[in-house]
Structure formats: C-alpha cells, structure tokens
Amino acid sequence: SSLTRKAVPTNAWWENLILEQGDQPVVTTPYIVKCLATAVVVCAPTPLVQETYVASVWHDDWRVHIDGCSRHRVAAFDSLSATVAYTGEAAAARVPLVRGMPFVTVIFDTPTRLSLSTIHAVVGVDGSSGPGTAVVRLNSGTMWLVSCDSPVDLQQSGMSGLVSSGPVIGAVRLALVNDASEQALAALLLAKDTIPVGGTIGVASGDDETAFTLNWITQGRGPSDRLLMCALPHHQLSLTNACWVDDIGKHWTSMGHLRAVQGLQWQWTETIEPLGFSGQRELSQEDKAVLRELVQNDANALPDDCGVLPPDPYFFGKAVARAMRIALIADEVGDAASCELACERAKSWLAPWLDGTNPDYLVYDDEWRGMVSTRGMTDAGADFGQGRYNDHHFHYGYFIYAAAALAKLCPTWVEERREAVDLLARDY
C-alpha cells in the first residue's frame, strides 16, 4: 500500500482503520462507521445520558454489503479524510470518510447488485424522489435517504433489507433525515450528487490573530458549490463565510448538535492569547496571602516516596504536572520554600521515567517509531491504549508541561534531561 512509504499519524480520528484488523469504529461526526471485511456499517448514534457522563450509543443502522472483495485498506488520507479501498479479483469499491459528512458514501468501481440491511425493521420504502433514490422508514422512528448514481429501483427485501433491481456502479449514499422532516429531505436531495472526498487546511498567522481556511475536495455529478457538510458548535460560533442550511435540522453528537453549512470553503479567525505560566491578571496581595497558605499545604502533601505514585504514564503524568503547577503558583506568590520543595519532588519523580528504571518503563517502538509503555506494547487495552498510540498528546503533554515548568524554575535540570524530554515531545 502507499501508506507503507509515508508516515501515518498517530491518535488520528481514523486510526482504528489501520490497527489490528481495521474493523473498529471511526467517528466521522455525525456518523460512526465500521469498515468490516465484507460490509460498511453505519450508525447515527443516539445519546445515553447519565448523571456523570453522556455517551454515544452504537447500533447497526445500516450495513452496505460489499461482495467479492478479499481485502480492505486505507488507500489515502489527508487532514480531513481517510479513504478505504476494497479490492478483489473482480470487484472494487472505495469509502471516503470525511469529517462532518452528512452522507455516508460507498463508491462501487465495478457493477454490483446493491444489498443493504439494518438491525431495525423496514416499515416503508418510497421511490418517488427519482431514479436510484429511496426514502426508507425504519421501526426505530428514523427516516433515511438512500441515493444511487445508477437509475435502479430500490426494493425492500425481507423484514430488514433493501436491494437494487439491477447492478449499481458509482456512488451509493445514505443520510439520516433529521426528525423525518420534508424540509430536511429536500435539502439532502439537493446535495446528494456532490460528494466530499477530502480537504486541506490553510493557516495564516499574524501577531495578534490566526486565520484558518478549510478547503473541501469533491467529486460526483452535482455542482461542487452544493456541497453540504456539518459544523460543530465551536465552528458555528466562529465561521465568517457560512451559508447555513438549517432545513436539514441538527444532528446529535456527544460534542453538541451539528449545523449544516453549504460551500467548498470554511473560514474563521482566532485571536492569539498571551502565552505564559501565570494568569493574565495581577494577583492582589490578599489573594497572594490566601494562596501562600494553600500552596504550602499542597507542596507539603507531595509524597517523597515514588512508590506510592500512579504506575502508568497517564495518571503519573497528571501527578507530576500537578506538582509543577504547585511550584509555579508558589513562585508567583513568593513562597520560595514551597516552590523548591515541589520542584525537588517533581525531579525525583521524573527521574525513573526518564532513566527507564520505573516498572512500566517507556520503550521505542521500531514499527510505529514512537515511545510507548512496556505494558502497552503487549496489551492493547493497557494504559488506556498507550501501545496503540491513544492520547499520547496529553499523556506525554503532562510530562512536557512539568519539564517546561522545571526549565523555567530550574534551568540546569532541563539541560541535563533535554534529550529524554525531546523524545517525548517528538512522539506527539
């Protein structure tokens, strides 16, 4: 594959496609998709709301069966997409997975009798929207638009299936019709022939602000400017050139409701805030007096014995970052003794990790070429998937924060430890 000749990202939203069998879910937002050996499984997640968390509930809303293909792999990726290619002796298909796509698309490169199935029961199929198009109602209460480039009839098969009257070639697209509304259906029908397949990100930084541009890449029979994508809540607050399409309704995600936007380009600007270790406002003398008492108690509570610290990189990282935050606060409020104590604790805690003498020591992975924990190398679930490169940016980010604070307060320490610290920074 072409991926063997280039670096691939770790902790990317689509990384499950290249781990193990590549059959674990990826979150494209608003959909969750699995690329199995013989099918693409589509889920429009529903919320599970508990007192302390909100989760996305998986259900097999649709399976697009891909027959005749013996393997699938990630064939291409960019900043906003990954494309999965299915291949076989006489069959081929592609699945462009793009962040924010309101349709899930499978592109059949060879003629195929389309077969879809769902975990729900099909309670109605309406083909009146045009050739190759069907509006399907499920007993879950949801309505879906299924659209094919080929002008075939789509017919119910059994209780939970949908098949084409003849072979299809080209794009097959599925979209949840929010609230089963006619307005949402009409908006989706206008956009069904314009397919996102990737995108690029442009960044232009000045002294006080940074301008961002997302340029979407499309293909298909429809005009490129009819592209419909979904924006997250923070995009909705920031986009300066958005053509909102509110008829489509709002998809639910665990990050908030999405809003549809039409067009090939997104633009917004962010203000660059001052970066430093202390707050942006001067502390009053009264505040400093209160903080001196608190920070002294916190510094004195930091354990001298490394053996009582968390053994994994995630929780250890949080502990050492907290110790150095205590040191920074002590420095800011003029408590030199507490600052020195917290720094000494952090240095002694970090030493085994940077020397490789702690029980769950870090090793260099010569396949993926990064730093991983010993337990993570042999156990996919250990240390929150550390050996599969999950969340290294904040596991090691805690280490780097602590090291950066030590560089400010104890510059000679970081010169001695720079090489080890740089390895962690390079990893993510």
Image (cartoon, grey):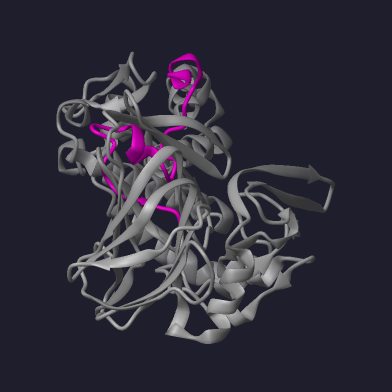
Q: 372 above or below 58?
A: above
Q: Residue at x 53, y 58 (%)?
A: 101
Tally of numbered discs? 0
Spot the residue most to the right.
207
Q: Nearer the viewer, residue 361 or 332?
A: 361
What's the magenta region?
1-28
Percent of width and height locating residue 409 = 54, 38
| Quarter occupied by residue 55 | bottom left
Q: 299 above or below 186?
A: above
Give the side of residue 368 with respect to residue 246, left or right. Answer: left
Q: Residue at x 45, y 54 (%)?
A: 28
Q: Residue at x 15, y 37 (%)?
A: 307
Q: Is residue 71 visible?
A: yes
Q: Is residue 67 magenta?
A: no
| Quarter occupied by residue 427 | top left
Secondary structure mainly formed by the magenta segment: loop
Of the 4 image quadrants, the one containing the N terminus is top left
Q: Residue at x 42, y 69 (%)?
A: 253
Q: Nearer the viewer, residue 358 or 27?
A: 27
Percent of width and height locating residue 150 = 50, 52
Q: Is residue 265 visible?
A: no
Give the side of residue 310 with respect to residue 256, left or right. Answer: left
Give the side of residue 423 with respect to residue 243, left or right. Answer: left
Q: Nearer the viewer, residue 82 or 130?
A: 130
Percent of width and height locating residue 406 = 50, 36
Percent of width and height locating residue 250 = 52, 78
Spot the residue most to the front.
166
